Image (tube, helix red, strand yellow):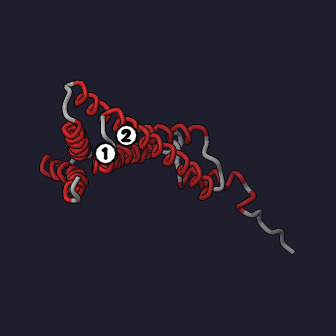
Amino acid sequence: MAAQPASPCRVPEYWAAVSRTIAPTPADEPEYADEHQVLRTTLVVYAAITLLGVIAAGSWKKFVTDEPELIVTTVGASIGVVIAHAWSSIMAHRLVHRLMMTRKQMLAELEVAASFFIVTGIAVAAIVTGQAFDWEFDDTVAFTEVVLIASLFTVGLFGSRASGARWGRSLAWGLLDAAVGVAIVATKLLLGG
């Protein structure tokens, strides 16, 4: 009787090779830098859309009534999303590849997740600006929503330009990104917020 080959599940080197082909690390493939940038950009857009939703929902019907509450709500939502993203990435990698992420992969994933805080910082700065100028709360909310929509437009416009698209196409991507944010705010206004 011929010897049976070792099961792939029992050979760590096999799974390490599979892991590198499915989820490369920066040292493994030069294209990883592009994928890493895609993930970071995804989280920035995701953050702007999520925080627009959180701010719209919180200010709708006055669930959140002042700037400090809005800041706590914004930062709290951001921390929750970052933890959820980081943990789900680690668990998904473990379940799919049957290996834990390497330290380098975990740090890269945390860096991607931390991109969310770029937008959180922008939102908090907008809220603080409204408070510093002693604006009415509704005006501060509106200003923060406009700043987040402008952030979506900026990511769409300059991200598209960086990829080599012409100005017209880049402008269209910026407007499309901004339209998602406008839809969130319009929904709030249509529901009486």
Above or below, 22 against 26 in this view is below
Identify which residue, 99 or 92, lies in the foreground.
Answer: 92
> Where's the N terminus, which quadrant?
bottom right
Precedes in sequence: disc 2 or disc 1: 1
Please indicate whether residue 180 sits to the left or right of residue 17 in the image.
left
Which residue appears at 33% of the width and 42% of the height?
64
Residue at the limit of the structure toward the top, as seen here: 132
Residue 134 x, y percent position in the rendering: 20, 27
Q: Secondary structure at mark 2?
A: helix
Give the amino acid at mark 2: Thr
Q: Which mark is residue 55?
A: 1
Q: Residues within 10 Å of mark 1 (few under 14, many from 20)?
A: many
- Residue 126's image quarter? top left
Q: Secondary structure at mark 1?
A: helix
Give the amino acid at mark 1: Ile
Residue with the mark numbered 2 = 74
Residue 128 x, y percent position in the rendering: 28, 28
Please indicate whether residue 112 sits to the left or right of residue 177 in the image.
right
Q: Which mark is residue 85?
A: none
Q: Can you see residue 158?
A: no
Please indicate whether residue 90 sits to the left or right of residue 36 in the image.
right
Identify which residue, 158 or 9, lies in the foreground.
Answer: 158
